[in-house]
Image (tube, rainbow, N blue to C red):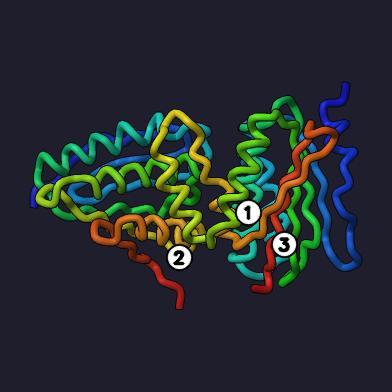
Amino acid sequence: MDDYKLLREQKAGSKAKGHHYMDLAFDREWGNITLVKTFFENFIISKMKSSEEVHKVGISVSELLENAVKYSSKNGVRIVIQNIKIGGIVKIRIYNYANEYHIKKLKTRLKEMRSMDSLDFYLYRMRESVKDKKASPGLGLARVYHEAQADITAKYHDNEKVVEVKATINLGK
Amino acid sequence: MAGIKIDPVIKGGMELKAEGTTVYISGCVNHPSPGMFIEPFITEVHNKILEKKIKEIVVNITDLRFLNSAGIRELVDWVMKLSALEEGKKYKIKFLCSSEYQWQESSMTTLVYLSPECTSKETANPLE
């Protein structure tokens, strides 16, 4: 069976005229995170003018992919980046297979995030991250929210078998 | 001033070393569990600082291209450990950053907010 089949079936927006669009599925391996991040950063460097824009996209790709690789319940991760354009509103969507525990955790984290501004949420997660060093730090979403000033949402597909995390980054800000 | 010397640790894409009153962290940290390497090193640094009664230390990260969130947690842990010390034992950490790496501006500024009385941040090569 194709590990990526269900991930690829999810509608991920389309390519708008004058904007760049990328859609990539790969195996859930830690080493792939840096490879994919570097690939996207190099692509984006060729399209964007400032290092700040590249950083915002790069940090979002890296942290969201780390989460997907860590929490995916089976092999396969898909990433779609839409609206790559100078000063544009870039949308990054990450799809992975999920289990009930991680979906519950994600929902809680997003609810906490919406109750605070990005700096407060990052500080809150920093303090929380050291309370249990055996657990995952749980800093990734806070970092994307604060460092990339991203709006982060999640959708759950196919009876919550697939989770889609979307980061929307306004590069014109 | 008495300093510390700790042999370099080169693992997981990073290099950690301490010379005098400066700790150097460099490389690119993408490892899933960088705490395996960073935590024992920081514990040794922290203990030696207390032993030698050093009051200020510089953490030079100007050559640290990337630090993932698991790595950030190790620095948070150090800062929290420091701020929990009794007043007479506390020391100051100055993070020396590079404007070349955007993540340092946002993440290290936030880290300093955790304990502004014990930590500060300086940019080695500020942008004009």
Q: What residue does disc 1 label?
A: A58
Question: Residue at the location (79% across, 31% down)?
Answer: A161
Residue B22 drawn at (x, y percent):
24, 51
Q: Nearer the viewer, mark 2 or mark 1?
A: 1
Q: Which residue is tagged 2?
A: B99
Specify whether residue A32 is in view: no
Residue neighbourhood size for the residue with mark 3, other residues' Cα within 10 Å, grouped as few (<14), some (14–19), many (≥20): few
| Residue at the spot of label 3 | A46
Which residue is nearer to you in this view: B5 or B34?
B34
Q: Is residue B38 left or right of residue A52?
A: left
Dot 1: element:
helix
Please report, as a chain letter, where disc 3 is located: A
How many marks the image carries: the answer is 3
- For this view, does B9 lie left or right of residue A48? left
Circle 3: residue type: Ser
How packed mark 2 is, by other alpha carbons closer than 10 Å (few <14, some 14-19, many 20 or more), is some
Q: Chain of mark 2?
A: B
